[in-house]
Image (tube, helix red, strand yellow):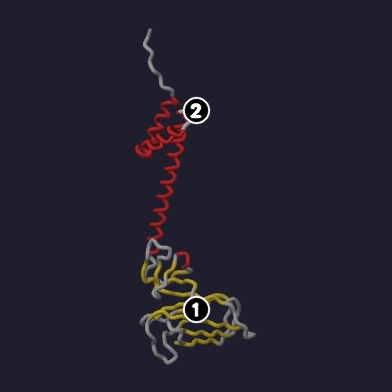
Amino acid sequence: MDPITPTTSASTVTGQREVQNAVEELGSEVFLRLLVTQLQSQDPTNPTQNEDFVAQLAQFTSLEQATNSTDLLQQLVDQRTELDIVSLLGRDIVTEGDILTLDKDNEPVLSYVLEEDTRKIQVQILDKDGNIVKNLDADQIQKSGSHDLIWDGLDNNGNRPPEGPYQYAIRALNEKDKEVELKTFSIERVASLLPGTDKPIVVASGRTYGTDQIQAIR
């Protein structure tokens, strides 16, 4: 009689391959911990079948791969974000606010949006102590929408005040001398960056902003 030759089913071969793949993907240490935990937890009277055990390992491996892929994708996104904010260094950004910065010889721009038509605009530029540095009034009709007003950089006495951040306040009146709702914007230069933080952009006034707060780049 011919000797009996052990045979290996296709499912067994497939299972061995999947186990081998699981070991390679997870690492032998993690794989062995999972194996021991699985064996300790199973019901002795109803042990887990090889096929079920292999299927569970395959599912875990797929989950691990998906998690690794997600982590890698997030790393790429974070790197791209940091590269993008680096390009903002030295440029002017527009955010909601009422701050402008006076440099050595610039003429700061005050940017605002009117909710309705106005016949008069009253503007006060204030220093850090709240003192009025300059009055800018415009007795002219301005349509609702976006507007820019240029400050020549001189105070009410015709002198140039110290460099640094200033605050401005705008009062707009319509034809019935009723105040008009408006929104003001800060235009400031990006002075430095703090990558990896919630608000990585530091402007000339020392304020910090997140990328989602930028309205425009100039």
Q: What residue type is labelled 2?
A: Asn
Q: Where is residue 182 in the image (x, y as percent from the top left)?
A: 56, 77
Which residue: 37% across, 67% down? 193
Q: In this view, does 43 lie above or below 200?
A: above
Mark identifier at residue 46: 2
The secondary structure type at the circle numbered 2 is loop
Q: In which quarter of the image is residue 82?
A: bottom left
Q: Where is residue 18 in the image (x, y as percent from the top left)?
A: 41, 33
- Tell me, yes or no, whether the two marked residues, 2 and 1, touch with CB atoms within 8 Å: no
Q: Which amino acid does label 1 sit on?
A: Asp
Q: Name the N-terminal-most of marks 2 and 1.
A: 2
Mark identifier at residue 148: 1
Which residue: 44% across, 90% down? 156
* The N terminus sits in image quarter: top left
Outermost residue, top side: 1
Q: Position of residue 172 (x, y in %)?
A: 57, 82
Residue placed most toward the observer, 105 or 62: 62
Q: In this view, does 114 lie above or below 201?
A: below
